[in-house]
Amino acid sequence: MENYDLHNHSTCSDGLLSPTQLIELAARTGTDAIALTDHDTTDGLEEAESAARKAGIAFVPGVEISVSWGGTTLHVVGLRVDPAAAPLAAGLRAVRDGRFGRARKIAAELERLGFPGALEGALELAGNEARLSRSHFARHLVRSGRVRDVQAAFDKYLGRGKPAYVAHRWASLENAVSWIRGAGGIAVLAHPGRYDLKPTMRDEMLHGFRAAGGEAIEVVTGSHRPEEYAAWRRVALEHGFLASRGADYHGPGESACEPGRLAPLHASLTPVWTRWAH
Ligand code: AMP
Ligand code: MN
Ligand code: MN
Ligand code: MN
């Protein structure tokens, strides 16, 4: 089976490698086809595509859209999207425009907790206001010696329910999926094991995703523990979803799983790439 990796980040969102560096790494690990799926932006796709052409690997243009479903934040990956499609571009711009206001609120909470200057620090790491994510705040706290590592920053301060967590309204599930489909893409529910939902809510979410036009879920991802793969494989089969595979790589030292270095999808699953690979 070909080595597809359909979920990865670059410095255009909260990754640590440039699109070119990411593609070059993927080529070294033996990835045959890689997607760049930055949070709420398609800015890196052109550079990544040209790097992939040079490296001789296939490129899949993607995006990972932040979604609010009730009080839960979901991530929906769009694969094979056309970044020039107007509704997608406008939708992503609106989502990005919300990031700076939220970042100011996060910084205010951190200030209250005794961490002044977090907005400036995170902004310096992010490069621009529209990219600001909790990952940049976490790295700022690490860099200033206030926490041991990024994981600790989330566990203590930035994770849901922690003191510097700020609730935020992202895109609706319906809009996110429709922007992806309107751009010719396939909508994939990212790392379903990461959402803290009880079984009935989980099923309601999966049905909502399907009703909105979602077609696939990630089964093998760097954001699932390998012990979780079988459970999500069963969910994909029961609900009739195509299955996706992706490292959700953010960078050296932060992501245990490098691009292309994941278990294969179980043979019972229909990979999402069967939709376009002939
Ligand atoms: P944001 O979109 O600003 O809320 O940031 C979300 C990003 O933070 C995710 O895409 C992950 O890269 C990172 N993240 C979220 N939760 C954790 C966690 N518990 N540990 C490490 N990174 C996390
Ligand atoms: Mn991220
Ligand atoms: Mn995600
Ligand atoms: Mn991701």
Image: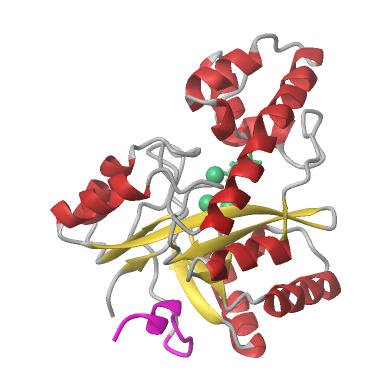
| Residue under the image location 72 percent in, 39 percent down | 159
In the rendered image, is residue 227 in sight? no
- Quarter of the view holding residue 72: bottom right
Q: Residue 274 location, x and y as percent?
A: 39, 84
Q: How is the image coloured?
A: secondary structure
Q: Residue 80 location, x and y as percent?
A: 42, 67
Q: Is residue 165 left or right of residue 178?
A: right
Q: Is residue 11 left or right of residue 95?
A: left
In the rendered image, is residue 63 in sight? yes
| Residue under the image location 69 percent in, 62 percent down | 175
How many marks do you count on the picture?
A: 0
Q: Is residue 204 left or right of residue 213?
A: right
The C terminus - image quarter: bottom left
Q: Is residue 123 left or right of residue 112?
A: left
Q: Is residue 13 above or below residue 70?
A: above
Q: Main secondary structure of the magenta part?
A: loop
Q: Residue 217 location, x and y as percent?
A: 57, 73
In which of the image's four quarters is ligand 1 placed? top right
For residue 273: magenta? yes
- Quarter of the view holding residue 110: top right
| Residue under the image location 46 percent in, 86 percent down | 270
| Residue under the image location 22 percent in, 47 percent down | 24
Say which of 8 and 58 sits in front.
Answer: 58
The N terminus - image quarter: bottom left
- Quarter of the view holding residue 5: bottom left
In the image, which residues are magenta? 267-278
Residue lying farthest to the front in this orientation: 86
For residue 173: magenta? no
